[in-house]
């Protein structure tokens, strides 16, 4: 005999519980989660629901006596017969409560699975970070997100929303280096003429004490694939919040694919010095050490470097012989004034201790007083004793005809 009230109550309760399970099954978007959940539900049915009977189960008499929650989940209606109604009801309540507790545990497992799936889905989406569709903020952000990222071109987005493409070094010292600029001397005989963007393109003059001012403005120029053929400055120069710099000395006209392999000097800082100066060279020069002829501030910091390729000895072998007594290799030195109070933006690979800075350091303003305009230009006085002669105050031909590439991390 079927006990109708109990059976009705149980039917409603079981329907509710199974409904929740079926609802969860039906709403899992991921196939693996559905399969896992389906297995759990089937286990649940076999171990808990099916034994949930009080006494003998009556033969079902047709579709109306069966719970149907999906085409594959179809279990017999449960019945109490031949037992005291209250004890049967208590037993059923107890079973249902146990079932609900079990269901709660299963829900927790499902929630954990969903979280893991969501995380995996997030990683899959972020795997495209650095593409045109999903530009990164810096190469470091891309490297931190996509562990397998390789050296090459990526799309970045400046804080102002400008999307640009640049080269990321993803392997040197754990990678994450963004190419932001290059200083290139296109015409050593042209003294502060076209192409001297890191000093003055408007002649040798005191009219513009900051020269073109590109060390500390929002101007941009050049392109990543021409970084060794002409000057480069992309929005990363003033937009990226960085800690360290890396410099490469690359022969002029080297193709992008060979920047790294052809860079005979590669070195980087490790002490996070940029954090003290606003996070990039723009703010270092703008707010701390302005590149201004006869500027009021003194020399900027000399930061120790770690060599990735080349050495102090190789650097010394390429410098003008006469500067060797005035320098200490193993640093990158910013904003260094010479004897005539002309500022030089960067001394690549060395600290300049003396006053003839113009023969080893690059970039500056618009006026060098010593026999003007002979030292005016992006590479200042590197040709003082002849073009590439590597005698007196002239650097080697290789140094004269190489671009210096700047990276941030
Ligand atoms: O910068 C070098 C200059 O100050 C001295 O040149 O020709 O007298 O050795 P020079
Ligand atoms: Ca020039
Ligand atoms: Ca230039
Ligand atoms: Ca001098």
Image (cartoon, grey):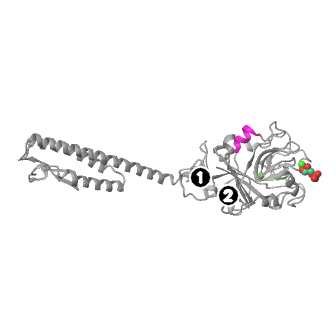
Q: Give the range drawn in magenta.
A: 279-289
Nearest the viewer among 54 and 155 is 54
- Residue 33's spot in the image, x, y percent? 35, 54
Judging from the image, what secondary structure is the residue with disc 1 in?
Answer: strand
The residue identified by callout 2 is 225
Cβ of mark 2 under 8 Å from ligand 3: the answer is no
In terms of image quadrants, where is residue 189?
bottom right
Q: In which quarter of the image is residue 202?
A: top right
* The stretch drawn in magenta includes residue 281: yes
- Per the picture, the main secondary structure of the magenta-coloured stretch is helix
- Report crowding for label 1: few under 14, some 14 to 19, many 20 or more residues within 10 A (C-alpha): many
Residue 312: mark in rendering: none
Mark 1, ligand 3, within 8 Å: the answer is: no
Which residue occupies the extreme top position in the image?
Answer: 296
Which residue is painted at 59% across and 54% down in the image?
A: 154
Asked if residue 43 lies left or right of residue 92, the reply is right
- In the rendered structure, the answer to whether residue 172 lies left or right of residue 372 reads left
Residue marked by disc 1: 155
Sort mark 2 into few (<14), some (14-19) or many (20+) by Cα contacts within 10 Å.
Answer: some
CA gap, disc 1 and disc 2: 14 Å
**Sequence-wise first label, 1 or 2:** 1
Using the image as rendered, state which of residue 329 and residue 264 is in the foreground: 329
């Amino acid at each position: 005999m079927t006990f109708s009230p109990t059976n009705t109550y149980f039917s409603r309760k079981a329907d509710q519980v199974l409904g929740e399970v079926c609802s969860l099954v039906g709403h899992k978007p991921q196939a693996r989660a559905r399969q896992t959940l389906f297995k759990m539900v089937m286990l649940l049915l076999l171990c808990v629901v099916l034994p949930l009977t009080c006494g003998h189960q009556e033969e079902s008499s047709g579709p109306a006596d069966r719970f149907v929650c999906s085409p594959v989940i179809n279990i017999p209606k449960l019945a109490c017969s031949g037992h005291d109604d209250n004890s049967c009801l208590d037993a059923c309540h107890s079973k249902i409560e146990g079932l609900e507790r079990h269901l709660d545990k299963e829900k927790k497992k499902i929630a954990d699975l969903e979280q893991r799936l969501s995380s995996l889905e997030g990683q899959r989406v972020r795997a495209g970070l650095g593409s045109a569709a999903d530009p990164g903020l810096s190469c470091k952000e891309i490297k931190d997100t996509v562990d397998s990222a390789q050296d090459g071109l990526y799309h970045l987005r400046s804080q102002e929303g400008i999307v640009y493409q640049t080269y990321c070094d993803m392997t040197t010292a754990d990678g994450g280096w963004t190419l932001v600029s290059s200083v290139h001397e296109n015409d050593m005989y042209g003294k502060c003429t076209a192409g001297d963007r890191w000093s003055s393109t408007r002649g040798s003059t005191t009219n513009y004490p900051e020269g073109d001012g590109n060390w500390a403005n929002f101007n941009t120029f050049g392109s990543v694939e021409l970084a060794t053929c002409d000057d480069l400055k992309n929005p990363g120069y003033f937009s990226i919040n960085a800690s360290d710099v890396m410099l490469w000395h690359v022969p002029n006209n080297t193709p992008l694919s060979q920047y790294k392999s052809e860079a005979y000097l590669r070195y980087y800082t490790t002490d996070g010095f940029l954090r003290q100066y606003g996070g990039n060279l723009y703010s270092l020069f703008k707010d701390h050490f302005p590149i201004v002829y006869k500027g009021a501030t003194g020399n900027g910091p000399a930061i120790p470097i770690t060599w990735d390729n080349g050495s102090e000895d190789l650097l010394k072998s390429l410098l003008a012989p006469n500067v060797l007594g005035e320098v200490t290799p193993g640093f990158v030195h910013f904003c260094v004034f010479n004897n005539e109070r002309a500022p030089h933006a960067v001394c690549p690979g060395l600290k300049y201790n003396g006053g003839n800075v113009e023969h080893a350091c690059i970039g500056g303003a618009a006026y060098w007083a010593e026999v003007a305009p002979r030292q005016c230009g992006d590479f200042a006085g590197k040709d003082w004793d002849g073009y590439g002669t590597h005698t007196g105050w002239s650097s080697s031909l290789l140094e004269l005809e190489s671009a210096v590439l700047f990276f941030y991390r």
